[in-house]
Image (tube, grey):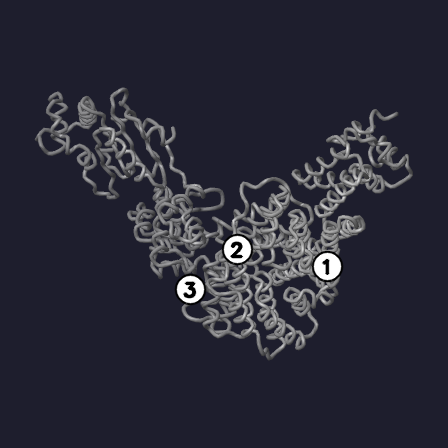
Amino acid sequence: MEIGAWVEATAGAVVIGGDAGSGKTTVLDRVARGARERGSLVLRCSGLRCETAEPGAGLHELLHEVLDRADGLPAFLRTALRAQFGLDPAGASRAHLGLATLRLLESLAADRPVTVVVDDAQWLDELTAGVLEFVAHRLRTTPVLLVAASRLPLRWPGEAIRLRPLAVRAAEDFLTSHASTLSAPARRRVIEMAQGNPLALREFATVLSERGDDGGPLPVTRRLRASLLAEAATLPPATWRFLVLLACAEEQPLRELMSAAARAGLRPEDLDPAERAGLVVITGDRVRFRQPLVRAAVQGAATWSERSVAHGAVATGALDPGWAAWHRSALTVGADEAAAAELEAAATRTSGDGAERRAIRFLRRAAALSAAPEERARRLAGTAELARQAGRNAEAWRLIGEVTSLSPPRAVLAQAELTRSILVLTDGLAGRSAAETIGATLRAATDPSSPYEREAAARMLIAAGSMAWTHEVSPDVRAELLRSVDAALAAMDATLVSDVLALSRSWTDPLGGAAGARERLPRVLTALRERVLADVPELRRPTRHFLIAAARTAETLHDPVTAAKAWDLLDDAMSTTATATTDEVRRLAERSLSLVLGGRLEDAAAHTDRAREHAECLGLPVLGALATTTHALARAWTSAPAQAPSVCAGGHSALVLAVGSWATGLLALRERQYANAWSALRGARAHRVVAWNAVGDLVEAAAGTGDGELIAAARATLAEAETGAGLLDSDHLRALTARGRALLDEEGAEPHFQRSAAAARRAGIPLELARTLLAYGAWLRRRGLVLKAREQLGEALFVFERAGARPWAELAAVELRAAGVAAGGRGVDAAEVLTPQELRIARMAARGMTNKEIAVVMQRSSRTIGSYLYQIYPKLAISSRAQLRSVVGDPEP
């Protein structure tokens, strides 16, 4: 029975089970409140965690207010009740007491319904428990509802309902209503720590609301600890020490745990009382607490000496070197560089489920044990990066603050600044402008004195360039950044870091740095591919960052093919390591634009959906906004979004604003709303790379309006992009600008269309190719060149359908119908549009022959036959082999 079904009930017995803090009392309160609102009489009692509870204490609490109604009962029942309450010298019979209680409740129910609410039934005194069990067995049609809550199973009859931990969505709703001011990262930490326990959610949220979220551990409050450890109060001392051992041991298997227990002077049977109390559960080779929160509660309640004994016993026999180092470090007081180094090495080696969490703990503890401030700063910087990767950004920001307060060496500061720069890309500028943030980074990167420090400074400059690329800063800031990069390059030897730094120069000065970037990019990708294949643990993080830098460089050069190769390498790099949560969101969000350009619209939508979900959970607003706008861009190709993406200049990066503007403009352009498209696409100027990606759309919007001023402005923008296409040597830009020229030069358009299509094929941008073919085909049709128009429009339809760009495919189909071709290829004369060789291949394929079989007949390779079919489909205005028979007719055998 669901809670909603029985909470309105008026008769019967219900037992609510659940762990400490699971909400049993809250449910009982809801039942009692609902019963009173319906006019019922509510009687309540609670079990007490006390070995010396008086027999019948619970019954007294339950019935003392209605005992006067016992006067109407038969004499022997009245005597039983009054004797139990000390009002009659006669002895009380338990059998009579149960019957007397039942009849009293029935008598009360004759006037109005009765609801009996029993909390903590597992702690009821034996007499009260027996009486209520007797009553529960005999409730039939009498309007008496007995609702009892218990941590342990009861043998009572009736419905049994178990309160499970809240699901993540329910926990989020709970925090929204009880702690609406908490940030998204804070809510995530509370949900993760509370494990679906309502009381823990409330207590942790209260702590964070009062003290703020500094990223530190969440304390188990006194109220929560009392609830979780209620059964532990009466356990034998040896059992309590065993619980402390189990809490400190954490992940040790049963064999290691029992060996540690023996070293601590404990026996297996010492754990029995805790198991009977339901505090622990033994399954397979593991002993675990019934609730994960109980572990933290035990650790918080244990004394330092109790924890020391436990850690010492576990450390001696731990087989995992990392955990052995961790437990030994728990006994250390003061600085211990040897222990710190051991923990740092353990953090590097961690792998498997929960690896990031363990690495953060190990490295954070190593920092605390570090003897030298510079070593402490270095380990804190490493911990900050691990916390960032794990999505614990509040903790990462706090750790970066600790690092900078220690005035660390330049190399350590560079590591912290690199982490800060990525946090800026995921969280935003944190109240500072992009210029201020970049300026601070440049100041930290000046005057490096050693080769090691020069490499560290280069990493900081790469981070500054990343911020400049995302936020499109002023010319003065770009000039300062370029001077710093050039000075650093002049002082550095040729290394992978210097090559990546040189690539980053193109982000700030794409036209001036294009030649150097194009020369270095293949060499950098080759080196990074070797790194990915080698999979050296200490190189994983910089390799991922460098791959993003390479992809960004290719995108800046408007080289979609090379950008896709870099992103593919990053996929491999991420799959061969433990996934870094924030880095995964960054990969999903930032790669999606490349997927759209490559015509992989379904993949782009899937990436952005996952990125948005994870960004919301982790509290990464910048990445979430980028994923939202890129998702809208993909939807502008595939289907109409529910609404245009909402972006505001004050809250997002230039990249987000530009992509959002492009998505809105492309959707308006698709609907032939040219003025709206022009207005939106002008917003893409916020980011130069995106603006040039959309230059073809901007020109089409201007041409569609017929407004002379807009067309003049479009010509000026087009001329800039044409210059850029030459300097960048970009077929991508050549395809877009040539199509723009064709749209502005109605009479001399054909050679521009042809150059655009050829460049688009070389650049690997199928959607833009189809756009050019669609415009070219429409231009041909208007001039009566119907057969030639069908060829262009058929291929455009094929490419759009293959990419899933259904609205654009429909535009091509409309043009095809205007050219005399029915939808689905009907009305096409295959003999007219195909060469004799193509027609022969089409007929064999329609007969069901495979490419390999056709290749044998035609004395060609199967790859060549596949290429022929790829050209045949668009000519016939179809998109699959299955449609061939309807177009070429019944083929001859």
**Which of the pair 157/436 is nearer the observer?**
436
Question: Is the residue under label 1 in contact with that under label 3 (CB below 8 Å)?
Answer: no
**Which of the pair 587/329 is nearer the observer?**
587
Q: Where is 647 relative to 15, above or below?
A: below
Question: Is the residue under label 2 in contact with that under label 1 (CB below 8 Å)?
Answer: no
Can the viewer see residue 648?
A: yes
Q: Where is 240 relative to 432, above or below?
A: above
**Which of the pair 146/611 is nearer the observer?**
611
> Where residue 238 sits: x, y (%)?
34, 51
In the image: residue 755, left or right of residue 803: right
Query: Which secondary structure, mark 3?
Result: loop
> Where residue 741 sits: x, y (%)?
74, 53
Of mark 3 and mark 1, the one earlier in the sequence is 3
Q: Residue at x 8, y 30 (%)?
A: 88
* Residue 720, image quadrant: bottom right
Quadrant assignment for the N terminus: top left
> Which residue matches tag 3?
331
Q: Which amino acid does label 1 sit on?
A: Glu
* Residue 856, image quadrant: top right
The residues bearing labels 2 and 3 have C-alpha atoms spaced at a distance of 42 Å
Mark whose residue sits in front, 3 or 1: 1
Graded by Cα atoms within 10 Å as few (under 14), some (14 to 19) or many (20 or more), the crowding at tag 2 reads: many
Of mark 2 and mark 3, the one earlier in the sequence is 3
Graded by Cα atoms within 10 Å as few (under 14), some (14 to 19) or many (20 or more), the crowding at tag 1 reads: many
> Which residue matches tag 2?
622
In the image: residue 737, left or right of residue 83: right
> Where residue 581 sits: x, y (%)?
54, 53
